[in-house]
Amino acid sequence: MSNRWRAWLCETATVTTPEPLDAPQTAPWAPPVAVPPPPPTPHASLTGAGPSPAFVPQAVTSGPVRSSRALATACLTLYWCRTGAEALQALAFANRRSVINTAIAHSAAGGITRSDVDADDRARALIVTVSILLVALTLAAAIATSLWARRVAENARSKGDRVVRPGLATGGWYIPIGWFWVGFNQIKNAVTRTGQSPRLIGRWQTAFVLATVLSSLILRSSDTGDTLQGLRNATTTGLVASVISLGLFAWCTIAARKALRSTTDALG
């Protein structure tokens, strides 16, 4: 074949090329479909079937619960000792009243003797000694009570109570005037949140306020008067106040015993 024909065939020939295979199309991005959660388990109070075997109810705690019974026993012992000291104070006032009556009789008969003065000095010293004993027992009782109240407050916190403040439960017993309610209120809060009534704590608080106020009045009236008759009147006032204070502190101790027992049973 001539070169002319060969060139013509090349120009008129149709070259067919195979079409490329379609590339796989990538699907547009879409957020993953959320898997629905399993259906909730019916509550026991609605179904009446009770909790599942795997459920074990537990109290919300944040620390160990330590027993406060030993501290409660120490508090009660000191309360009774202080009540006994009130009885000693009443006897001391009665003794001085007797000494003053003897001095008055001697004064009417002819004059006070040196023995009368010495006897009155000893009687007054006895009253002062008993008063110091009362202050010491009161301080010891306050320390024991604050330690017991702190243990109770800490146990309440360990059981999940976030309202009770152990700091106030401890220091409230040393705040002037505040010792009448600060510490008591913390104990009341702890007891109330256990579902029990704070009535016993309230009775203890009332007895404590009355007994403490009257006891302070005794200290002010124990040695007033410039004459023998004035001293006898003051000693008689102290004697009567001591007897009343003795009854009030005995009532306070009985109320405290019930409150200590119920609070310790509720909070450990």
Image (cartoon, rainbow, N blue to C red):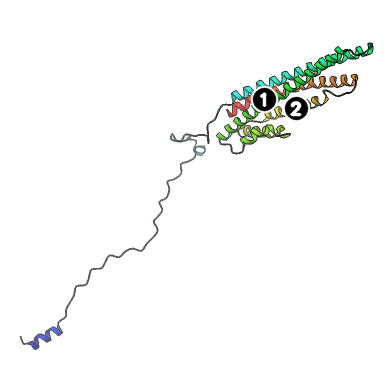
Residue at (52%, 37%) from the top-left corner?
45
For the C terminus, the quadrant is top right
95 up-or-down from 187: above or below: above
The kind of secondary structure element at disc 2 is helix
Query: Foreground: 150 or 116?
Result: 116
Would you call the spot at circle 2 few (<14 residues within 10 Å), some (14-19), or many (20 or more)?
Answer: some
Would you call the spot at circle 1 few (<14 residues within 10 Å), some (14-19), or many (20 or more)?
Answer: some
Q: What percent of the width, then of the height, locates residue 176? A: 73, 34
Q: What percent of the width, then of the height, locates residue 215? A: 77, 25
Query: Foreground: 218 or 260?
Result: 218
Query: Foreground: 43 or 164?
Result: 164
Q: Judge left or right: residue 40 versus residue 155.
A: left
Q: What percent of the width, then of the height, locates residue 191? A: 63, 32
Residue type at numbered disc 2: Thr
Query: Foreground: 43 or 202?
Result: 202
Instruction: Give the quadrant of residue 180.
Output: top right
234 up-or-down from 155: above or below: above
Q: What percent of the width, then of the height, locates residue 78? A: 67, 22
Instruction: Give the quadrant of residue 118.
Output: top right
Which residue is the site of mark 2?
212
Q: Is residue 212 visible?
A: yes
Which residue is the site of mark 1?
140
Disc 1 vs disc 2: which is toward the camera?
1
The kind of secondary structure element at disc 1 is helix
Q: State which tag comes first along the sequence, 1 or 2.
A: 1
Q: Judge left or right: residue 5 versus residue 150.
A: left
For the N terminus, the quadrant is bottom left
Q: Disc 1 and disc 2: Cα gap in Å?
A: 15 Å
Residue type at numbered disc 1: Ala
Q: Judge left or right: residue 24 versus residue 264.
A: left
